Image (spheres, rainbow, N blue to C red):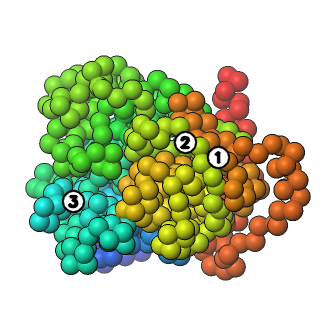
Amino acid sequence: MKSDNIKTGIARTPHRGLLMATGVSRKNMKAPFIGIASSFSDLVPGHIGMRDLERQIEKGIHSGGGQAFIFGVPAICDGIAMGHSGMRYSLPSRDLIADCVESVASAHQLDGIVLLSNCDKITPGMLIGALRLNIPAIIVTAGPMLDGECGNHHKLTMVTGSFEAVGKYRNGEIPEEELLALEEASCPSAGACQGMYTANTMACLTEVMGMSVPYCASASAVSSQKRRLAFESGMQIVELVKQNIKPSDIITRESLRNAIVADLALGGSTNTFLHILAIANAGGIDLTLNDFEELSGKIHQIVKINPSSTLTMADFHNAGGVPALIQSLNSHLKLDKEITEFYKKVYRNKEIIPDYDKSTYTQAGLAVLYGNLAKDGCVIKTSGVAPECYTFEGIAKTFNSEEEAMSALENNEIREGDVIVIRYEGPKGGPGMREMLAPTSLLVGKGLGKKCALITDGRFSGATRGASIGHVSPEAAEGGNIALIEDGDEIVIDLPNRTLDLLVDDVTLEERRKHLKPFKSKISSGWLRRYTAFAKSANVGGTLMSDEEFEERKAERQAQEKN
């Protein structure tokens, strides 16, 4: 065992003494050492119930014959960080979490690890950390919260009950008393927010990859089933250690492509593009934005969960959850025969998760667009776009920050037919690639969700809906054409043909480029300054790595492609 490096032999007497100080018995000194990396936090609704899950996992590990050790990692709530400078820290925290997991597990020579996660950047950060360590690992996502109820409002979510309610209040559609009542009712329990937003999408994809036990993604955070799944995961990690099954055995090019297929079928969060690419980078796996583009032309959506419909994660779970989704998608996934046989037998409510060939939808829930505004690509959650907006031609209104755009929206300066352009919000420009849920929610709340479009080199919450295009690459801070847009320019969005174009000729654009001021970061010190220096473009996952490492990975991928 790897832990023998800290507990076996005369020379390790001091180490054993220190371990005994933590409560490890002499008998358990011979057991596999299993870490529980917990992202418990009193600050994050998705994580406040984790103390109980920690103990369930711990019980499972001890029952399986292991010795458990709990340690903490950071967690940020994107909803609370939204709409202000705090959101700059959200995406960078993904790499910080990976560093924490790697540091603690490596320093203490753990034999295996259970990663207790839930919200947006924590799950991908832990997956990246697991791949770096490459010791047996399993993910336990803490699950979604209950649906909200308030008067005549049913199946409330964090978005419909709060973010979009702000727009309705500002538009005079609801009184202040109703807004306050919705505020109290929209998030009624511990857990990740109720829709197919980033947290729940990543939980589903983690289960599809094989890094979580069945039903873990959708079982409610406050259910007894979640507690049982946590215990089962504790038992399972000991078996993984005994069999030496590592993340690199599970997270492969095939399993990541399976995750993309599931993502497209669910119409998940656009943030998953960033995370899957970053996970692939961590594992040295040949996967690019082209894989998303290729599969989006083959796979159509079969399930619509909030914000694309009124259904919530509770409905998805009761319909059979991820196992039922895998059953429906089976012919489009690459799975072992034994695994396929398991999923053939699971329950599935075909009204919510239909047979793939009987789905009424015709396109993927997510799409990659290219054009002179996004030469390296951009992404959109097509499942949240009304059919009448699949093609959209409008007039640009440019803003160099989210705050500028919010001010214009709040002061009724946005009109029907406008294309809101929010730039200098990419990985480097933000820095940290902030989410634009506040402006998109305000658009919807003001009744402009089908009458305007929004493009940005920042990103969106999985809760975003409407003609909202993010991850525009190259970003403005790197001189991308999004930096050259002027008020009054015409922009064309064409979802059927997967294009995003600025109707300005190349000669004019080059003339504008001559007058473009060099980018200067808003941040001059601290963690975000270091992030700005090493963050790569959204089309490669916003990955944090040096130029040298990035070029090495690029060369490795090119060599793999030739072979």
Q: Mark 3 belongs to which amino acid?
A: Leu
The quarter of the rendered structure image containing the C terminus is: top right
In the picture, the disc for residue 392 is 2
The residue identified by callout 1 is 491
Q: Residues within 10 Å of mark 3 (few under 14, many from 20)?
A: many
Q: State the image quarter where residue 31 is shown.
A: bottom left
Nearest the camera: 448 or 260?
A: 448
- At numbered mark 1, what does the secondary structure look like: helix, strand or loop? strand
Q: State the image quarter where residue 526 is shown.
A: bottom right
Q: Is residue 299 visible?
A: yes
Whole-percent x, y for residue 145 in the image: 22, 60
Whole-percent x, y for residue 485 in the image: 72, 55
Looking at the image, is mark 2 or mark 3 nearer the viewer?
2
In the picture, the disc for residue 127 is none
N-terminal-most mark, 1 or 3: 3
- At numbered mark 3, what does the secondary structure look like: helix, strand or loop? strand
Nearest the camera: 163 or 472?
A: 163
Q: Mark 2 belongs to which amino acid?
A: Phe
Q: Residues within 10 Å of mark 2 (few under 14, many from 20)?
A: many
Compared across the picture, whether 240 is left or right of 431 comes to left
The residue identified by callout 3 is 156
Q: Are marks 1 and 3 in contact (CB under 8 Å)?
A: no
